[in-house]
Amino acid sequence: MNIEDFDKQQHDLDTDSDVLIAPEEVAVQGKQLIVYNDDFNTFDHVIDALIKVCKHDPIQAEQCTFLIHYKGK
């Protein structure tokens, strides 16, 4: 699958019916980010994203990335 097909597939999703919430998660006021372990994103990409999006410092982002990797999310 090339990137154009992937982007098209992502835009075709109905987010109301395609979002799965694990039983231990509850709705909270404000914003919540859940990152799942996958075989597509590299450690460096996830670390960079946590630094940019969550304003983590590099060590905190690296620690979160390892937690995601070993705990699944």
Image (cartoon, rainbow, N blue to C red):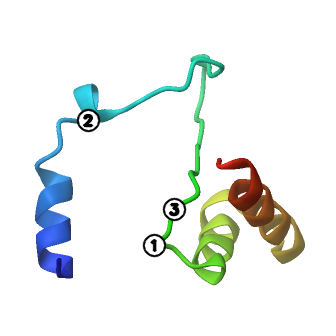
Q: Which amino acid does the dot numbered 3 rest on?
A: Asp
Q: CA distance from mark 1 to mark 2?
A: 21 Å
Residue of label 3:
38
Helix, strand or loop at label 1? It is: loop
Q: Dot 2: few (<14), some (14–19), or many (≥20) neighbours within 10 Å?
A: few
What whole-number distance in Å separates the C-alpha atoms at marks 3 and 1? 6 Å
Q: Amino acid at mark 1?
A: Phe
- CA gap, disc 2 and disc 3: 19 Å
Counting other residues with Cα less than 10 Å from the Cα at mark 3, is it few (<14), some (14-19), or many (20 or more)?
few
The mark that comes first in sequence, 1 or 2, is 2
Residue 44, compared with residue 39, is above or below; it is below
On screen, residue 25 above or below 43: above
Q: Could you say which quadrant of the image residue 56 lies in?
A: bottom right
Per the rendering, the mark at residue 40 is 1
In the rendered image, the quadrant that contains the N terminus is bottom left
Residue 15, position as x, y percentages in the image: 26, 35
Q: Which residue is mark 2?
A: 15
Front disc: 1 or 2: 1
